[in-house]
Image (cartoon, helix red, strand yellow):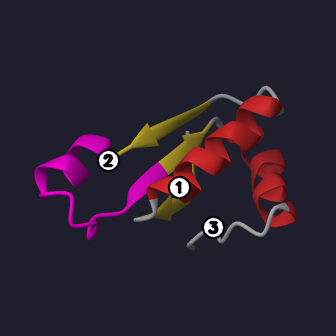
Amino acid sequence: MKELLHTTDPTVIALAQMLLRNEDITCFEFDVYSSILEGSIGILPRRLMVADRDHFVAAAIMRDNDIDLGQ
C-alpha cells in the first residue's frame, strides 16, 4: 500500500474516493478513528491509500482533477 494523499478536508477524501472507484481502483481511508478521537476539530489529517500497482495511475487521476496530493 502507498499513500496517495493526506488531508484534513473530508470533502477532498470523498471526491478522491469517488474518482478512484469510477476507475475501478480500490482505495482505503486511514486515520479516520484518530480524527474522531481528537474531537473532530480537523487537525489530524486522514490518509488515502492505494495498492502499489495502482499508485501511478491514481496519482495521475488526482492531478487531472486538480487535487493536491499533500506531499
Residue at the image position 72 percent from the left and 47 percent from the top: 55
Asked if labels 1 and 3 touch by Cβ distance under 8 angstroms, the answer is: no
Q: Residues within 10 Å of mark 3 (few under 14, many from 20)?
A: some
Residue at the image position 79 percent from the left and 26 percent from the top: 24
- The answer to which quarter of the image holds residue 5 is bottom right
Circle 3 residue: 69
Hey, what amino acid is under mark 1? Answer: Thr
Between discs 1 and 2, the one toward the N terminus: 1
Q: Residues within 10 Å of mark 2 (few under 14, many from 20)?
A: some
Q: Which mark is residue 31?
A: 2
Quadrant of image for the C terminus: bottom right
Q: Residues within 10 Å of mark 1 (few under 14, many from 20)?
A: few
Q: Position of residue 7 (x, y in %)?
A: 46, 64
Q: Is residue 44 magenta?
A: yes
Look at the image and give the residue range highlighted in magenta.
32-47
Quadrant of image for the N terminus: top right
Between discs 3 and 2, the one toward the N terminus: 2
Left or right relative to 36: residue 31: right
Residue at the image position 28 percent from the left and 64 percent from the top: 44
Circle 1 residue: 11
Q: Secondary structure at mark 3?
A: loop
Q: Secondary structure at mark 2?
A: loop
Q: Secondary structure at mark 1?
A: helix
Q: Position of residue 14 (x, y in %)?
A: 56, 45
